[in-house]
Amino acid sequence: MNVDQLYASLLDIPKTDLSLWQDFFLKFYRAWFADGRWISYFRGLVTTLEVTVIALIIGVAMGVLVAIIRTAHDQQRPGTHNILLGLLNSVCKIYVTIIRGTPMMVQLMIWGFVIFATSRNFTLVGALGLGINSGAYVAEIIRGGLMSLDPGQMEAGRSLGLNYIQTMRFIVIPQAFKAILPSLGNEFIVLLKDTSLISVIAGKEIVYAARAIGARTYEYMFPLIITAIMYLIMVLIFSWLQGKLERRLRRSDRR
Amino acid sequence: MIDVKNLSKSFGSHLVLNNISQHIYPGEKVVIIGPSGSGKSTFLRCLNLLEEPTGGTITFDGIEITNPKTDINAVRRQMGMVFQHFNLFPNMNICDNITLAPVQTGLMSKAEAVETAMALLKRVGLEDKAKAYPAQLSGGQKQRIAIVRALAMKPKLMLFDEPTSALDPEMVGEVLNVMKQLALDGMTMVVVTHEMGFAREVGSRILFIDGGQVQEENTPEEFFNHPQNPRLKDFLSKVL
């Protein structure tokens, strides 16, 4: 007997006579199998991954840019003062302050309902909002990593005659990258989960699909549990990949 | 070789170096001693501008390095520096640590740099460590590698900032031996150290810095046998 036949057979039983498990099965069937609904979760999942990737690219690009500007500004030779760098640094500071000082959902609503109010491409607007938000956190993570490295490493590189950019590229950044990978991984997981927020501006990811199904069947428990399980599986996969990468990068530290 | 005129350095309102003038001649081995916090490391770090002086000028081979328009990277390529905490690059193996700067600054091709690195490693007895990572070495080995890394740039001058202070006592000897060999080869050296035996044996001139000023300078014999300055006498009575 397959699930459809089981479902059909249970429909003949009066509602009050159903056992707990039979009731659960009916609800789960409606949330997952009926009308090929499971497809809409996976469509949502694909959108979630797309949004995560776009937001990640925007976030890392902005984060690296802001971190480099802020670090280069702070590490200028004392006495010298580059006006352009000072100006860029102020812009970066304002950006980080605004993004970190306001709730993510409010930012998304401003992007969706104010700045891009006429756009129909809700998913892309959501990805943009998430990416710009993520950029501020990534910038602080990278800056922290660059600052936390022993200043002796920079001094050693410079004392050998390497310039600032060469020292950054060959010595500081490779080591900082290893140091920030755990926090960067966390930020990535937060970003993945925060994609659920774009449903408030009608981005069609998993939560959006789950809510639509819930509205159709008047039953939210199973759609939301399914959503939670899908996120959990994704996060577990990425944590595992992150752990693998960290172990690879740690090879040179072994004694 | 290096001419220091009226060098001053202050961190905020704290004056660390007070109007120091010195000349370092080619082939000289200048040893700088003094109590902690006297400014001796700061003086050394000013010579390659790791610390930016707040006053005075430093001239290296006719180039005024304290001038903001000077290409400080080009000058630093001719000055090796060895640090108290080695500062090897933990993300690279020993061979890459040594060849990075010569290759990236365009001084040598990769093959030449590797050849130079292996020859230098052989001289300090560590040719079997070329593929090891810094974390796998002892302190003494790390410091010998750090010296090799600086030498790979074929510098005209070597600066040593307390090169043995972070080492276990039993490893001090191996590092000092490398430095002695270097001195015998005629390298110009400026060494900040607490190793009085090394100062006496290798130094051609000894400076005693205290309170941001050179309180006394002399040849090793005079310096240790007939100290004049009362603070130096006090210092030597404590350390010898």
Image (tube, coloured by chain):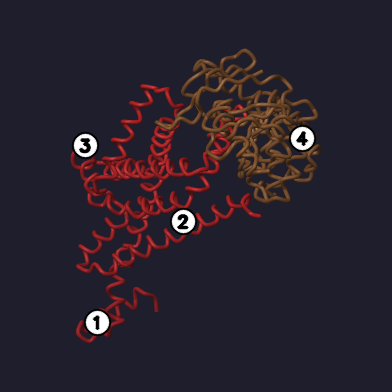
Chain colours: A red, B brown
Per the image, the residue denoted by label 4 is B201
Farthest residue in the bottom direction? A17
> Across the whole image, how many numbered discs are drawn on residues?
4
Vertical side of A134 occupied by A216: above or below: below
Residue A12, quarter of picture? bottom left
Q: Identify which residue is drawn at 29% across, 69% down.
A: A222
Amino acid type, callout 4: Glu
Per the image, the residue denoted by label 2 is A238
Depth order, front residue of A59/A249: A249
Left or right of A229, for residue A147: right
Left or right of A121, for residue A172: right
**Gap in angstroms between the C-alphas marked 2 and 3:** 33 Å
Vertical side of A230 occupied by A150: above or below: above
- Which numbered disc flags the more N-terminal residue, 2 or 3? 3
* Discs 4 and 2 carry the same chain letter: no
* Discs 1 and 2 carry the same chain letter: yes
Residue A8, quarter of picture? bottom left
Per the image, the residue denoted by label 1 is A12
**Gap in angstroms between the C-alphas marked 3 and 4:** 75 Å
Which quadrant of the rendered structure holds the N terminus of chain A? bottom left
Amino acid type, callout 3: Ile
* Discs 3 and 4 carry the same chain letter: no
Q: Which of marks 1 and 2 is in front?
A: 2
Q: Where is residue A236 in the image (x, y as percent from the top left)?
A: 45, 61
Amino acid type, callout 2: Phe
Crowdedness near tag 3: few (<14), some (14–19) or many (≥20) residues, C-alpha within 10 Å: few
Q: Which chain carries label 4?
A: B
Q: Where is residue A240 in the image (x, y as percent from the top left)?
A: 50, 59
**Gap in angstroms between the C-alphas marked 4 and 1:** 104 Å
Q: Identify which residue is drawn at 24% across, 46% down.
A: A102
